[in-house]
Image: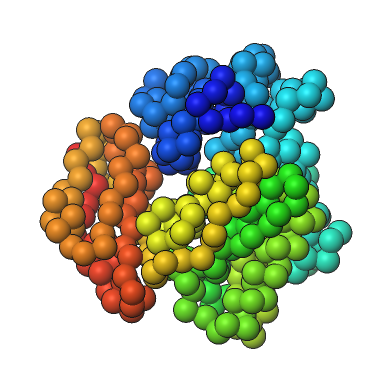
Amino acid sequence: MNYFSSDFKLGILGGGQLGKMLLFDTRKFDIQTYVLDPSDEAPCKIACDQFFKGDLMDFETVYNFGKKVDVLTFEIELVNLEALVKLEEEGLKVFPSPKTLKLIQNKGIQKDFYIQHAIPTANYKSFDNLKSLIVDILDSKTKLPFVWKCTEFGYDGNGVKVIRQISDLDNLANVECIAEEMVPFKNELAVIVCRNPSGEIKTYPVVEMEFHPEANQVEYVICPARIDDKVAEKARAIALTVSEKFNHVGLLAVEMFQTEDDEILVNEVAPRPHNSGHYSIEASYTSQFENHLRAILDLPLGNTDSKVAGIMVNLVGSEGFSGNVVYENIEKILGWNGVTPHIYGKKQTRPFRKMGHVTIVNEDIIEARKIAEDVKNTIRVIS
Ligand code: ADP
């Protein structure tokens, strides 16, 4: 199929920042794109060929959108799965596959998949609802502390809570959940794997993620991770296995824990471009977005090596500010070497909302980390 400067249409479900960054590459290649998103202010709107407003969870809307395009992908997992299954049955290429998405959309099913395929992961127990979990705790079958996770519709840590005492369960939704062993980890790592339908497969270097202690959102992503080479090799090997077991097409971001004794445990995966790979736009030979595109179109994959060390700082809304966004001191950081802000295009800020990110590249990772901290302390997302 001729994708370039042709009638070919790539459909993208979701019009957020991930889609917007993917569109830099569709434009680079002159590939036509259609985007579906519920918001009039979707970041993708300015860069796609045609924008459709609609509910991503609605069967008819997703199905009808799929009928307009030649290949369908998504930048968010919360999409109507039945529509994707039907579209695939009718011959549309949907990547990543709805089968993979089904395994991933539910954290309990995802964990079961790791166990079935001997992929190392933290021990867990599944419950139909909160009430049955409480019964299990009262029967001393589930021991405190543990990590509670709702199996569906959690996002950026909001469906996750550390339970140290039974009262920590107060006010949690009475929904299907898992109770997972607390992992005493020294690092949170991630590896992005890309794989095309022909089976060509590559991994990006291991990155290290530093989290904001309250918001449970990634604050810094550091590439390469400052860990032992052997641990890094192990993490890449496990990530490759995960992608192969899913028979995945496109990008798969594999989030992992490095335990105190250097074991690697898979936490969860995201079947799409990922926050942990944004550094690749400036620091890698081929960005994660370009490789996602290459992978889903069954084109040869690009080089995943880094040219320089890269650090990403998330730009989230400062606490105490809601309303029309202002990026305070953005001019100042633009004056520093190797510093590139990305502004997603959301007009309204609110506390902890992901509004953009800044990439810092430098030959020296220690220097990059220092600049990243200066960036973090200088730019503020206010209203
Ligand atoms: P989300 O899907 O919302 O990103 P995660 O499962 O990644 O949720 O959990 C969010 C964060 O909670 C993780 O990045 C980690 O810091 C912490 N966490 C999750 N599971 C565990 C665990 N088993 N032990 C310790 N910390 C955990």
In the image, taking residue 331 as reference, residue 282 lies left or right, namely right
Quadrant of image for the N terminus: top right
Q: Nearer the viewer, residue 152 or 327?
A: 327
Quadrant of image for the C terminus: top left
Q: Nearer the viewer, residue 380 or 281?
A: 281
Query: Would you identify the image quadrant in which residue 23 lies?
Result: top left
In the image, taking residue 185 as reference, residue 28 lies left or right, namely left
| Residue 258 in the image: above or below residue 39 | below
Residue 24: % across, % down: 41, 39
Residue 273: % across, % down: 54, 47
Instruction: Give the residue drawn at x 56%, y 38%.
Output: 76
Spot the residue most to the right.
Answer: 116
| Residue 287 in the image: above or below residue 38 | below
Q: Nearer the viewer, residue 152 or 289?
A: 289
Instruction: Give the residue drawn at x 78%, y 39%.
Output: 99
Residue 73: % across, % down: 61, 34
Instruction: Give the residue drawn at x 26%, y 59%.
Output: 339
Q: Nearer the viewer, residue 174 or 273?
A: 273
> Does residue 181 appear anywhere in the picture?
no
Colour treatment of the image? rainbow
In the image, taking residue 281 as reference, residue 92 lies left or right, namely right
